[in-house]
């Protein structure tokens, strides 16, 4: 027979091996939920008394403890449970800030007596039957003064049960888990700060650009209207019409920029409301090209849709804005004029619209961020192009809200083609009979 000393050495060796395995798992490049799930599997595999296990994390926004990962439970059901502060074993250990061993079924029942009936029912369904553990060990997950939750391990049937000797080991595992959660939390905060700083920098840049671009047409409008109001000058009719058309052109440019900003703001706050109705895309394409051609006489639009092009369920206001944004972009990047070809293609489950220009084109490195907010393509011709960098991102958001997608291909000096797809209505057998 082994002596007590040999048994203790064996236990310590197993625990050291377990800690090594847990530490190795925690350094793996997994997302936090997968990481914690892998750690739970390791813990259950090396601790004989652990027949059930759960990591409960405190959700500050909801004011509840939620299951992040578990073992021995039906996770989808257990995820319905939300423990209040101080409720059951989890709440008590979290408040106390130190590991606890609950040795007997009676002590377990006493510590769970304040669990709300709804949570007790969820736990029973997640377990498969209504039975309380006979022994529980729970350790807080905290780093310095940052408290994240509780690691709970339970014995359901035995014969092996937790002892006081298991407490330091379980707390050490809990500390390692807490460090992983803390690292993920700090990284998420750092990422959020970087994203916020980047977004703020981009906003500042676009506002500076926009204010400059608005000042230019306003100066022109002011100059033309001041000239027209000069009493000492008798302008010929042709010159007056020329000035008024220039004023109109500058106003249209400002209206486009303001519309893009407003549409982007609606999307940012989740107010992109889609009201679908039967729609013929070819009619919208012709309406938009007629509007834009008035301001771009050097461009020749061609609308080419097959005769059997189907009716699509979409929001006419927003899809018209998609056409405007893309065609406006095509005209902007083909300053010398040329064809702008809008084609429709029918596929089994969706339709695709392409808009091709004969402009300056886009370099491969600029195609990747083309649909990101505030990104503006660099002109390889040295041409100064006005804009907010929001037209194509807004178009993408609208298309994706309809269940479609948008993409682009281009070659420098040879023009650009943008495509967007929209799903076709599902046709049932009864529709075919009708």
Image (cartoon, grey):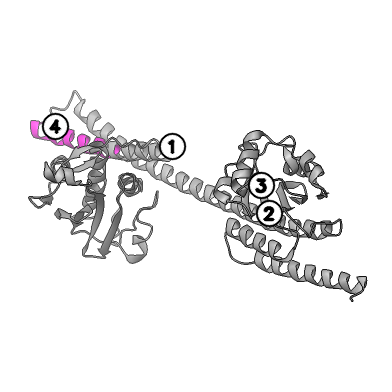
Mark 2 highlights which residue?
53
Residue range corresponding to the magenta coloring: 236-254
* Residue at left offset 19%, top offset 28%: 228
* Residue at left offset 21%, top offset 58%: 359
Coordinates of residue 150 in the picture (x, y in percent) = 72, 48
Q: Is residue 249 magenta?
A: yes
Mark 3 highlights which residue?
57
CA gap between label 3 and label 2 equals: 13 Å
Nearer the camera: disc 3 or disc 4: 3
Coordinates of residue 376 in the picture (x, y in percent) = 36, 53
Task: Point out the tag, 1 or 4, that comes first from the N-terminus.
Answer: 4
CA gap between label 2 and label 1 equals: 40 Å
Coordinates of residue 37 in the picture (x, y in percent) = 61, 59
Task: Point out the tag, 3 or 4, that comes first from the N-terminus.
Answer: 3
Please indicate whether residue 256 sits to the left or right of residue 202 in the image. left
| Crowd band around label 4 with a 10 angstrom C-alpha radius: few (<14), some (14–19), many (20+) | some
Mark 1 highlights which residue?
269
Task: Point out the tag, 1 or 3, that comes first from the N-terminus.
Answer: 3
Along the viewing direction, whichever of 427 and 23 lies nearer the viewer: 427
Task: Point out the tag, 2 or 1, that comes first from the N-terminus.
Answer: 2
Q: Which quadrant, please, contains the C terminus?
A: top left
Q: Secondary structure at mark 2?
A: strand
């Amino acid at each position: 027979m082994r002596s007590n000393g040999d048994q203790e050495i064996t236990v310590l060796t197993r625990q050291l091996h377990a800690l090594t395995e847990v530490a190795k798992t925690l350094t793996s490049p997994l997302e936090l939920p997968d990481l914690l799930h892998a750690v739970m599997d390791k813990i259950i595999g090396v601790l004989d008394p652990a027949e059930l296990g759960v990591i409960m994390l405190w959700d500050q926004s909801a004011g509840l403890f939620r299951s992040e990962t578990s073992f021995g439970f039906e996770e989808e059901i257990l995820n319905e449970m939300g423990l209040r502060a101080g409720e059951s074993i989890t709440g008590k250990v979290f408040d106390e800030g130190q590991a606890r061993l609950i040795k007997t079924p009676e002590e377990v029942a006493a510590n769970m007596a304040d669990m709300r009936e709804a949570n007790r029912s969820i736990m029973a369904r997640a377990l498969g039957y209504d039975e309380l553990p006979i022994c529980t060990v729970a350790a807080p997950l905290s780093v310095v003064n940052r408290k994240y939750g509780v690691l709970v391990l339970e014995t359901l049937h035995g014969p092996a049960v937790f002892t006081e000797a298991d407490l330091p080991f379980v707390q050490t595992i809990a500390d390692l888990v807490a460090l992983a959660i803390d690292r993920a939390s700090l990284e998420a905060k750092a990422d959020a700060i970087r994203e916020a700083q980047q977004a703020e920098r981009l906003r500042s840049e676009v506002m500076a650009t926009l204010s400059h671009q608005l000042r230019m047409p306003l100066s022109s409008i002011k100059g033309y209207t001041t000239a027209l109001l000069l009493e000492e000058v008798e302008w010929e009719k042709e010159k007056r019409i020329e000035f008024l058309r220039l004023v109109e052109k500058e106003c249209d440019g400002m209206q486009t920029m303001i519309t893009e900003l407003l549409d982007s703001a609606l999307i940012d706050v989740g107010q992109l409301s889609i009201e679908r109705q039967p729609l013929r895309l070819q009619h919208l394409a012709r309406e938009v090209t007629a509007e834009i051609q008035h301001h771009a006489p050097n461009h020749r639009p061609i609308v080419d849709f097959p005769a059997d092009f189907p009716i699509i369920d979409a929001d006419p206001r927003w899809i018209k804005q998609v056409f405007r944004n893309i065609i406006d972009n095509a005209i902007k990047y083909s300053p010398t004029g040329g064809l702008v070809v809008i084609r429709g293609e029918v596929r089994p489950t969706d339709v695709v619209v392409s808009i091709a220009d004969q402009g300056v084109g886009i370099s491969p490195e600029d195609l990747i961020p083309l649909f990101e907010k505030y990104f503006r393509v660099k002109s390889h011709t040295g041409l100064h192009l006005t804009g907010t960098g929001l037209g194509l991102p807004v178009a993408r958001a609208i298309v994706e809200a309809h269940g479609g997608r948008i993409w682009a291909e281009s070659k420098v000096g040879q023009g650009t083609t943008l495509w967007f797809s929209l799903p076709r209505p599902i046709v049932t057998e009864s529709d075919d009979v009708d």
